[in-house]
Image (cartoon, helix red, strand yellow):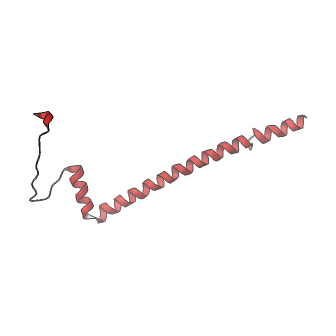
């Protein structure tokens, strides 16, 4: 009987037991999902870097959106919102 209890303990709870294997498998799957997310973010960043290096229209778009720049001879109209009146 004692032998059965020892075998049960090592099979279920021990260092290489079922519970540990289940926990490690779950952790591995979470790491795989995280790695895939990071891989996708890296691809997006690489595409943006490539666009910034090679695509002048993309650079212009970013300059207009983030810096508020305008082209030469371009007229900018600013309207007051009704809250400021």
Instruction: Indicate the quadrant containing the N terminus: top left, top right, bottom left or bottom right.
Output: top right
The residue at 52%/49% (across/down) is 34
User: Where is residue 30 drawn, in percent x and y?
Assistant: 57, 46
Count the marks: 0
Pick the residue in front: 44 or 14: 44
The residue at 45%/55% (across/down) is 40
Instruction: Indicate the quadrant containing the C terminus: top left, top right, bottom left or bottom right.
Output: top left
User: Where is residue 43 drawn, in percent x and y?
Assistant: 42, 58
Residue furthest to the right in view is 1
Image quadrant in which you'd find residue 53: bottom left
Residue furthest to the front in view is 82
Image quadrant in which you'd find residue 10: top right
Pick the residue in front: 58 or 85: 85
Residue 43 drawn above or below residue 16: below
Residue furthest to the bottom in view is 54
The residue at 80%/37% (across/down) is 9
Q: Is residue 18 left or right of residue 71?
A: right
The residue at 70%/45% (across/down) is 21
Image quadrant in which you'd find residue 60: bottom left
């Amino acid at each position: 009987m004692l032998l059965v209890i020892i075998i049960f303990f090592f099979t279920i709870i021990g260092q290489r037991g079922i519970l540990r294997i289940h926990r490690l498998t779950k952790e591995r799957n979470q790491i795989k999902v995280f790695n895939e997310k990071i891989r996708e973010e890296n691809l997006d960043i690489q595409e943006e870097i490539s666009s910034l290096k090679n695509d002048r229209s993309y650079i212009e778009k970013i300059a207009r959106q983030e810096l508020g720049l305008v082209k030469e001879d371009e007229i900018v109209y600013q309207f007051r919102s009704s809250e400021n009146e």
